[in-house]
Amino acid sequence: MINKIGIVGGGNIGGVLVSEIVSRRLARNIGLVDIAPPEFAKGKCLDIAEATPVYGRDINLEGSKTYEVLEGADFVINTAGVPRKAKPDGSFPSREELLATNLKITDFVAAGIKKYAPNAFVISIANPLDAIVYRLFKKLRCKPNRIMGMAGVLDSSRYKYFVAEEANVSVENVEAVVLGGHGDTMVPIRSACRIYGLPVDQFVNKTALAKIEKRTRAAGGEVVGLLGSGSAFVSPAISALEMVEAIAFDKRKIVPVAAHLKGEYGVKGLFLGVPVILGKNGIEEIVKIKLTPDEKKALRVSINAVKKTCAAVDKVR
Ligand code: APR
């Protein structure tokens, strides 16, 4: 069992994280910080704490408007930020449009983590994902194996779900991975998609696969449009906990995460969604995937999009 998990932001994703950690008995202590008035984080924690007798879990929940509740956390999960909301005309902002607002929040978050939990593993979920995790890393100056963004687990899960639905087989039979930035340029890797270990196109025709891949790239927006207020929150929370469990239980599980690259996939100094081995040291190893020429090309486009956003981040002091 983990001693303590700190969560920054107790909104939709943060709330699911807390209740799911309690339900899984994943940690003895949870510290939740959220600046929302009057005492939003306290309220969230009290609500869930009052259900612990029903859950049958003894767990210490502490919510606060200030960051000292992160003190001693082994993991910090960052969800602080403004989510995408549908505009009155039905369109919704891109993740990049959230950048300016969320960067200010991120600097505040980084200062809190640095002060109270400088040695924690940091998993960031706030959008625009690749840019926010890059900023956190710059501010925290922590070891690159201890900080990562959650996107690939969710994007791959969406891809798997759509493939399973189309093939009419169990989601458990589908293996799939999405690489690159967590934006419209993300790259579902068809050549690595398998159903029961067999090539996916044995079950799903190429036209349907192309549609699924397009839907995967836009899947976050699809949920935003349907919800009408805010963005997906259950699937991101569950995906982040897969990463926490892989590290806490030293699973050495291969999962796609936004990882700091030092030349792998032709990227240096930026965070990009790639498969990694997650174990007790966090990111133990970056895993290389052989890509088709088309996939390589698409990944290059995605890398350029991430580079552009990170260049915009660097301009904001
Ligand atoms: N410190 C702590 N919490 C903060 C801060 C801050 N500086 N700034 C904002 N928050 C809190 C808000 O008060 C809010 O309760 O972050 C919470 C965010 O919750 P929601 O608005 O419900 O957003 P959510 O759906 O949880 O998504 C959070 O993750 O997937 C991304 O795009 C999404 O960037 C968004 C983030």
Image (cartoon, rainbow, N blue to C red):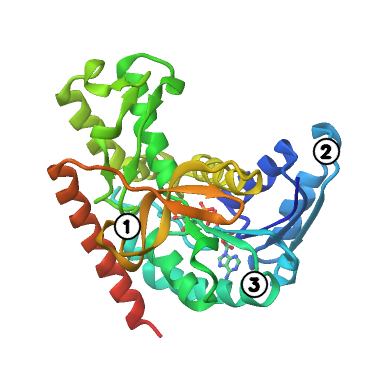
User: Which disc, if any, is residue 304?
Assistant: none
Evaluate if marks 1 and 2 touch, with contact meaning CB atoms under 8 Å apart: no
Check the image and report above or below for 296 versus 214: below
Q: With 227 as the anchor, is 80 left or right in this view?
A: right
Check the image and report above or below for 264 versus 233: below
**Ligand 1 within 8 A of label 2's CB?**
no
Q: Which of the two residues, 237 or 258, is positioned nearer the viewer here?
A: 258
Q: Which residue is mark 3?
A: 118
Distance CA(mark 2)–CA(mark 3): 28 Å
Three-letter code, disc 1: Pro
Q: Which residue is mark 2?
A: 57
Q: Which residue is mark 1?
A: 93
Which quarter of the figure is the C terminus placed in? bottom left
Q: Nearer the viewer, mark 2 or mark 3?
A: 3
Which quarter of the figure is the N terminus placed in? top right
Judged from the image, the secondary structure of the residue bearing numbered disc 2 is loop
Which residue is rendered at x = 83% and y = 38% of the image?
A: 57
Is residue 128 among the parts visible in the rendering?
no
**Figure quadrant of residue 208:** top left
Judged from the image, the secondary structure of the residue bearing numbered disc 1 is loop
> Upstream in the sequence, badge 1 or badge 3?
1
